[in-house]
Amino acid sequence: MQAKGPIGVFDSGYGGLTVLHDLARALPEHDFVYLGDNARAPYGTRSFETVYEYTLQSVEWLFRSQHCPLIILACNTASANALRSIQQNDLPRLGAGNRVLGVIRPSAEVIGRYSERGAVGILGTNGTVQSGSYALEIEKFFPHLKVYQQACPLWVPLIEHGELEGEGTRWFVKKYLDELRQQSPAIDAILLACTHYPLLIKQIEAALPAGIRVVSQGPLVADSLKDYLYRHAELDARVSRNGRRVFYTTDDPETFSRQGSSFFGATLHALHTELNY
Ligand code: DGL
């Protein structure tokens, strides 16, 4: 019998903690280990090749050093640029029966239900928007849904610097929302397709007219994972269950613990790691 291990949750930095918050709530007994590659974040402005290389190194570390049977790429940029290549090219050599899943498909599967007028907006990093992954995935589930995308490159640095309130942030929130809505007045549902953006949800909602729904991914990914483990009992049986949450960062653990708590919604104590194993 294979040894049991935690579910790995990977993000370029802090953002995936907003997803882990919901995953841990949905699966309270399952163990989770989080890896934030803060030393090399942000990923959103990097090339496809670089995001793939960094994500692959992180995935290998989670498999080899943490013995995760399953990894969630809780980062849209990594899901958009690295997931498919890792699943197709790397997973066979990284461990038979191990799995890597992303956040795009669970969101694409349900986003059409939030729109009555058949038009949704996707807000993400440059890397996510340029990959075109959302439009491709959504088309499989909602072929008639119109998908409009908008990159919001200044939101991640504002959030990481704790600039959630104030005139400057309100201005940049409005700027990107206006640019999205100028693409189509029919948009009535907007997906926050970057794991950082839920921290700005109040400001985003305040800048929109009534009748436009703003959707965070965490609960969608959590529902989807719960369902996936139910359907894959052999994988679920390989996840250890002691209710443990362990946090690693490739940068300074004290800074991560301090900053990360506002993303995770609870205090946390991170450890440092290099990505060698
Ligand atoms: N967490 C990343 C995402 O969901 C954004 C942060 C970054 O650019 O590294 O796309």
Image (cartoon, grey):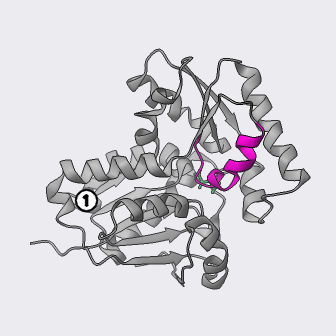
Query: Looking at this rendering, what residue extends furthest in the top direction?
Result: 144
Task: Label 1, secondary structure: give it.
Answer: loop
**At which x and y percent is residue 41?**
64, 63
Q: Residue at x 64, y 82 (%)?
A: 252
- Horizontally, residue 262 falls left or right of residue 110, namely right
Residue placed under numbered mark 1 in the picture: 98
- Horizontally, residue 207 falls left or right of residue 193, namely right
Q: Quadrant of ligand 1?
A: bottom right
Q: Magenta stretch: residue 111 in it? A: no
Q: Quadrant of residue 92?
A: bottom left
- Horizontally, residue 18 falls left or right of residue 207, namely left
Query: Looking at this rendering, what residue extends furthest in the right direction?
Result: 167
Q: Quadrant of residue 172?
A: top right
Which class describes the residues within 10 Å of circle 1: few (<14), some (14-19), or many (20+)?
A: some
- Horizontally, residue 269 falls left or right of residue 223, namely right
Query: In the rendered image, is residue 152 in sight?
Result: no
Looking at the rendering, the stretch of residues picked out in magenta corresponds to 191-207
The total of numbered circles placed on residues is 1
